[in-house]
Image (cartoon, helix red, strand yellow):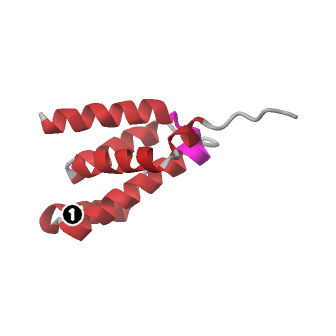
Amino acid sequence: MIATIKPSFLVYDTLDDRREIHTLLSRLHPRMAVNWLEKLCLKAVVHGARPGPSRAMRERVEMAIRKGGEHHRRLVNEIYMDVWMLCSQHGLNIDEAVRNLEELAKKQKG
């Protein structure tokens, strides 16, 4: 039998880890969360192209700031899914991304 090595992002694919990442994202100010995503995108290059947050995400950031609640939750979900996409399809290092997210959440709290 050949042993397969899981991609590093699958290590975080547990309910507790997914909740923790989502909770950390939800603690960030919407602009800070999107800026964090943009920085992650800079580290992911595929075939010479660099992914990035959608243009429409900026509008959703402003809506999350103004109205909060469900608008903020939707933005957090979108960012969360983009991070998984960066890890699964663009080879982003999830360990580094999560460490950075934890540091940002601590700074925002403090």
| 94 relative position to 8: left or right | left
Within-10-Å neighbours for mark 1: few <14, some 14–19, many 20+: many
Q: Which element is circle 1 on?
A: helix
Q: Position of residue 7 (x, y in %)?
A: 63, 38
| 46 relative position to 25: left or right | right
Q: Quadrant of residue 1?
A: top right
Q: Quadrant of residue 105?
A: top left
| Residue 76 falls inside the magenta stretch | no
| Residue 88 falls inside the magenta stretch | yes
Residue at figure coordinates x 18%, y 33% from the top left: 107
Q: How many marks?
A: 1
The residue at the far right in this view is: 1
Please tell me whether residue 58 is drawn above or below residue 20 in the rendered image: below
Q: Identify the residue under disc 1.
A: 64
| 48 relative position to 50: left or right | right
Residue at figure coordinates x 16%, y 61% from the top left: 65
Q: Amino acid at mark 1?
A: Ala
Q: Position of residue 95 (x, y in %)?
A: 47, 31
Start and end of the magenta stretch?
87-93
Q: Quadrant of the C terminus?
A: top left
- The reply to whether residue 12 is in sight is yes
Q: Quadrant of residue 49?
A: top right
- The reply to whether residue 45 is in sight is no
Residue at figure coordinates x 85%, y 33% from the top left: 2
Please tell me whether residue 59 is drawn above or below residue 4 in the rendered image: below
